[in-house]
Image (tube, rainbow, N blue to C red):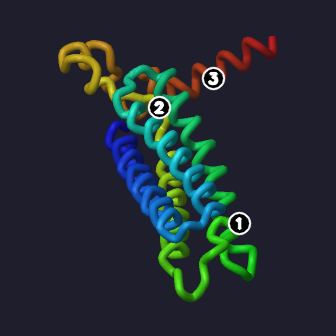
Amino acid sequence: MRWRKALLSLFLAFAVVISTVSLGWSIANDDHIDTTIYSLHLSFALYIFLISALSVLQVTIDDHSNSIIHLTALLTVAFLLLGSVAILPNSPPPAAFSIGDDEPVLLGLWYALLGIYTVGCILAYSTPLGPPLHYPPSAIYSEKTVKSITNMDERNVCGSIGRRLLCLKSLCCNHILL
């Protein structure tokens, strides 16, 4: 799980870089509306990057699951909002109001950020919240202990095989009927 969280942090670091470049581009164009919007984008990207970077070092199940659930919720909202704004209108996204034919850079950065949030959302959804529910006994105990506690008969868990099981069932059923 740690490598998934590290990969998620890497993608969210790219989101911080893209948001920073977008903010710098809007400052260079002296557009105050875009500057405000991209500064909010940058603060959101920094927030989720910090949560994901701190979650890499978390080892307890409660802390890990809380941070993954929080990241999943935030990335889902970001993905849905950015995706709906990018897909639904016929004009460029409202956050890139000044984008025209002369400024395709911000539009490309917008779609790159949407792609990164999509990948981050998929990674957050697919990250398990806890350890696997079944461990093979050989992964936990020594070989000697496994041989002493494990039933070696692979056909039946209780060791009853063949006709004896059928006879035991008929005895139980007859006893219940009487």
Q: Position of residue 92 (x, y in %)?
A: 66, 77
From the viewer's perspective, is 30 left or right of 151?
right
User: 163 or 29: nearer the eye?
Assistant: 29
Classify mark 2: residues with Cα within 10 Å, few (<14), some (14-19) or many (20+).
few
> Which quadrant would residue 31 be assigned to in this image?
bottom right
Q: Position of residue 2 (x, y in %)?
A: 34, 37
What amino acid is labelled 2 in the image? Gly
SS for callout 2: loop
Local secondary structure at mark 1 = helix
Residue 155 location (% of width, % of height): 41, 34
The mark that comes first in sequence, 1 or 3, is: 1
The image quadrant where one finds the N terminus is top left
**Closer to viewer: mark 1 or mark 2:** 1
Looking at marks 3 and 2 on the same chain, the residue that comes earlier in the sequence is marked by: 2
The residue mark sitting in front, 1 or 3, is: 1
What amino acid is at disc 1? Ser
The numbered disc on residue 162 is 2
Q: Residue at x 43, y 62 (%)?
A: 21
State left or right for residue 178 relative to residue 20.
right
Q: Is residue 26 above or below residue 132?
A: below
Whether pointer 3 and pointer 2 mark residues with C-beta atoms closer than 8 Å, the reply is no
Is residue 81 toward the left or the right of residue 2 in the image? right
Residue denoted by label 3: 169
Sequence order check: which comes first, mark 1 or mark 2? 1
Give the quarter of the figure containing the C terminus.
top right
The answer to which image quadrant residue 171 occupies is top right
- The residue that disc 1 covers is 84
On screen, residue 149 above or below 59: above
Q: Is residue 69 visible?
A: yes
- Name of the residue lying farthest toward the front: 30
Q: Residue at x 46, y 21 (%)?
A: 158
